[in-house]
Image: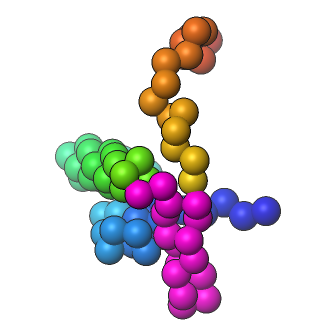
Amino acid sequence: GRRIKLDEIASATLGKSKSADGLQSIIWWRQGKIDDVVAYCKQDVVVTKDVYDFAMKNGYLLYGKNGEKEKIILDTSSWEKPVENNMAPTLGF
């Protein structure tokens, strides 16, 4: 019943934090700091990939809860299997 933030997972699992959050990137965008937004997005992708790679290798992730780390066991066996209908959803614009 709870959505765990990427930063909570990355921090507990990898000891890495995101460089900022989505709200900060909106502020940078409105201030015209496009390079900061691009850097934030790139670093976010790197952290996401590192979390994914850890999960694939180890079969679990960690997240912080009440000052302690909790383990999330994952079945990654089908994560990279091809699917017959590999249609990606698209936006209608």
Q: Nearer the viewer, residue 66 or 41?
A: 66
- Outermost residue, right side: 1
Q: Residue at position x 49%, y 25% from top?
A: 81
Q: Give the residue at x 58% y 9%.
A: 84
Q: Is residue 10 above or below residue 46?
A: below
Image coords of residue 91 (percent x, y): 59, 17
Q: Position of residue 42 (x, y in %)?
A: 27, 45
Is residue 49 depicted above or below 19 in this figure?
A: above
Secondary structure mainly formed by the magenta segment: strand
Q: Quadrant of residue 15?
A: bottom left
Which residue shows up at 43% across the image and 74% down it?
A: 12
**Quarter of the rendering occupied by the N terminus:** bottom right
- Horizontal side of 91 relative to 15 (left or right) equals right
Q: Is residue 68 magenta?
A: yes
Viewer-closest of 10 and 76: 76
User: Is 91 placed left or right of 1 in the picture?
Assistant: left
x, y percent for residue 3: 66, 60
Q: Quadrant of the C terminus?
A: top right
Q: How is the image coloured?
A: rainbow
Examine the rendering and report whether any part of residue 93 can be seen. no
Q: Does residue 74 appear in the picture of this structure?
A: yes
Q: Which residues are magenta?
A: 58-73
77 drawn magenta: no
**Exactly how many numbered labels are in the figure?**
0
Name the residue rendered at 45%, 30% in the picture.
80
